Image: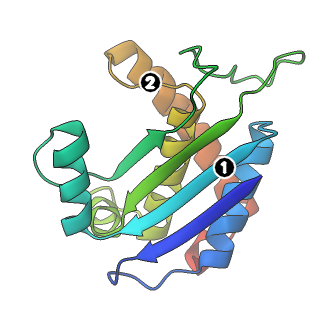
Amino acid sequence: MSVTIANRQRVQKINLRLLKKIADALLTELEIKKAEIGICLVGAPEMTRLNETFLKHKGSTDVIAFDYRTEGRAGSPLPADGAHGVTRPTISGEIYICLDEAVLQARKFSTNWQSEVVRYLVHGVLHLVGFDDSSAGARRKMKREENRRLREMTRRFPLSKL
């Protein structure tokens, strides 16, 4: 597995080594055997450019995942129960996480920005393994899985040290 992190923001100081450990643990928990992921931590101006250029949405957003796989796009998410005998995909992509949005959302939902960053990481990885949030039903299913994985990462790692 290859996980690289680029910190291109100055909003918050962040422990990149801990974030990488969390990303590696998440991939292991999802039983991903091969992964090539770039995680880019950015501020609102860069996220706005990405969102408007690639997704044609106005303004900034919290997380964007770019899937670089050229084959094996089944379009269905991995089973949440860790069923045996399931071939896990190779994932390849980039996840852009906006620290400005993490700070804003943390205030809005009475949490901390570190938890928001990990939530965005989980959300991006779930997109790369096939989850979709374009419909209400798919969004609910993805949110349940996102919450479950975030709880697990919160139990395993001191997110306040991120």
Q: Mark 1 points at which residue?
A: 36
> How far separated are the C-alphas under marks 2 and 1?
20 Å
Q: Name the residue under label 2.
A: 132
Depth check, front residue: 144 or 22: 22
Residue 145 visible in the shown view: yes
27 displayed left or right of 54: right
Q: Quadrant of residue 109 in the image?
A: bottom left
Mark 1 is surrounded, within 10 Å at the Cα level, by few (under 14), some (14 to 19) or many (20 or more) other residues, namely some
**Residue reaching furthest to the left:** 58
Depth check, front residue: 16 or 147: 16
Residue 112 visible in the shown view: no
Q: Nearer the viewer, mark 2 or mark 1?
A: 1
For residue 119, above or below residue 156:
above
Position in image of residue 101 (x %, y %) = 28, 62
What amino acid is found at the position of numbered circle 2 in the picture? Asp
**What label sits on residue 158 in the rendered view?**
none
User: Which residue is drawn at the image coordinates 55% and 57% (left, top)?
Assistant: 38
